[in-house]
Every structure is written in C-alpha cells, then in structure tokens.
C-alpha cells in the first residue's frame, strides 16, 4: 500500500513538472527524414550528448492505413504517463517514470539496437491513441522499450508508426510536430517520384538490306584471276 502511494505521488510530481516544461519551452524540430526509397524510410533522431540515432519503417500491404507521427518526446511522455496513471499498472505497455526506464528488463537490448547507427536503423515503435472519456489513452503494439530509451536519453523528437487515421490524428493532436500525420502511401510515393527515370532507347528504322554485289565476269581471254593474288 505504501509503495503504491509513493508511486502515485512520484507520478503526480513528474506530471506537474512535465506540464510546466511542455508549455514553457520551445517546440523541438521534428526528427528528420534522411532517406526514402522503395524498400525503406529512415529518420535521424538527435540525442543530446551522443551520436545521432536512426529509425526506419518499411512499406507493406496496407500503406494507406499506416501513418507516421513525429512526436515531441516530452509531450508524448506526458501523455503516455498520464494515461498510465490510473488502472493499468499491470499492462505491459504501462509507462514508467523516466528515472525508472533504464531498469526495464529489456533496456539493454535497446541500448544495443540503437548503437548500430544508420547501417542498421531501429524499427519505429508501433503505438496509437484513442479517447478514453476525459483523457487520451496511449497504447503500444510494439516498441515500448525503444521508446523508454528515447525518453530516458531525452531525444527531442522521434517518429512513431500508427495504424488507422483516427488514431494517428489524435496522437498528432496531442503531441505531434507536423500539421497532419503522414501516411505510408504518401511517404513511399516520394520514393517513386524521386526514382531516376530509365531512358527508353530510341527506335530507328531498320536499315535497308544491302544489295548483293554484282558478279564480276573475267575479261575475255582470261580464265580467272591473275596468278599471285588472292580471291
């Protein structure tokens, strides 16, 4: 009972600090899209005091239903922590306090994953949002620990994969940095527009068939070529 009370008070203090921070500080620049081709999109995620990290997404069969939301990390952390504060302590996607995130049992795997750099970017976390009475509920299908790593290391912004336009628009409204979410269809259409056009070889009219050379008749009095010359 005492442990739960301490946890409740710690979360309330953290949320109060986040409320003040998110409102007073300038909005960060969104994570930069640095590569997009037919196979993959890659974003650069700056991390204070560390090398840039990289995250990626791949196209699929339902590109029109998948979206990318580039979030303000502190605003996302506030929304996730607030939605985790009541009645969902046992959920696997419950948000921890920032100070507790490095204690997550899978945190070391996120450390290793983000260390690979641009050559092997970390897949986007797969999350979403829905309205739950008077608050927004943040849930994850995948990527809880990599999100812990980004929040714990205070990355200003990172991209999240979201299924469904309604969920993406709500998450973007709560903590997004773009005017609207970007669908995978729009995202990977950029690759098609940027792909170099292969020039089609010009068609030429077929060359006229060469006329056979006329037969040369030996001069009268000669039976064939002169001696000493090839045919």
Image (spheres, grey):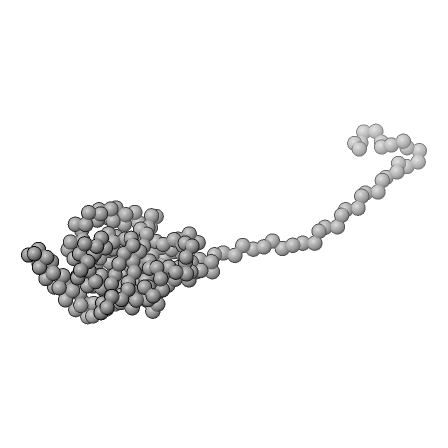
| 29 or 145, nearer to the observer | 145
Report how many numbered discs are placed on residues in the image: 0
Which of the 4 quarters of the picture holds residue 30?
bottom left
Which of the 4 quarters of the picture holds residue 229?
top right
Which residue in the rendered view is the most extreme toward the top? 227
Residue 146 visible to the viewer = yes
Q: Residue at x 60, y 53 (%)?
A: 201
- Quadrant including the C terminus: top right
Residue 153 visible to the viewer = no
Left or right: residue 7 versus residue 176 is: left
Q: Residue at x 90, y 31 (%)?
A: 223
Q: Residue at x 25, y 53 (%)?
A: 144
Left or right: residue 126 versus residue 98 is: right
| 133 or 122, nearer to the observer | 133
Q: What x and y, as percent, mark residue 8?
A: 11, 61
Which of the 4 quarters of the picture holds residue 221?
top right
Which residue in the rendered view is the most extreme toward the right? 221
| 196 or 8, nearer to the observer | 8
Q: What x and y, as percent, mark residue 102?
A: 18, 51
Question: From what the image shows, is residue 109 above or below residue 31?
Answer: above
Question: From what the image shows, is residue 231 above or below residue 204?
Answer: above
Which residue in the rendered view is the most extreme toward the left? 2
- Quadrant including the N terminus: bottom left
Q: What x and y, as percent, mark residue 46?
A: 27, 57
Q: Residue at x 41, y 61 (%)?
A: 64
């Amino acid at each position: 009972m005492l442990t739960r009370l301490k946890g409740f008070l710690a979360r309330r203090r953290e949320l109060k600090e986040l409320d003040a921070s998110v409102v007073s500080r300038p909005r960060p620049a969104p994570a930069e899209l640095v590569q997009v081709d037919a196979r993959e999109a890659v974003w650069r995620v700056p991390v204070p005091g560390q090398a840039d990290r990289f995250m990626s997404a791949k196209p699929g069969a339902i590109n029109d239903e998948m979206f990318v939301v580039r979030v303000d990390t502190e605003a996302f952390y506030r929304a996730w922590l607030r939605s985790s504060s009541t009645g969902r302590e046992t959920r696997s996607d419950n948000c921890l306090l920032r100070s507790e995130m490095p204690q997550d049992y899978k945190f070391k795997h996120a450390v290793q994953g983000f260390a690979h750099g641009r050559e092997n970017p970390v897949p986007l976390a797969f999350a979403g949002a829905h309205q739950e009475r008077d608050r927004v509920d943040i849930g994850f299908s995948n990527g809880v620990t990599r999100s812990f790593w980004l929040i714990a290391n205070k990355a200003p912004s990172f991209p999240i994969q979201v299924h469904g336009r309604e969920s993406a628009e709500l998450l973007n409204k709560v903590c997004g940095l773009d005017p609207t979410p970007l669908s995978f269809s729009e995202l990977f259409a950029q690759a098609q527009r940027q792909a170099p056009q292969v020039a089609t070889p010009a068609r030429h009219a077929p060359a006229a068939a060469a006329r056979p050379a006329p037969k040369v008749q030996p001069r009268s009095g000669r039976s064939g070529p002169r001696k000493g010359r090839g045919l």
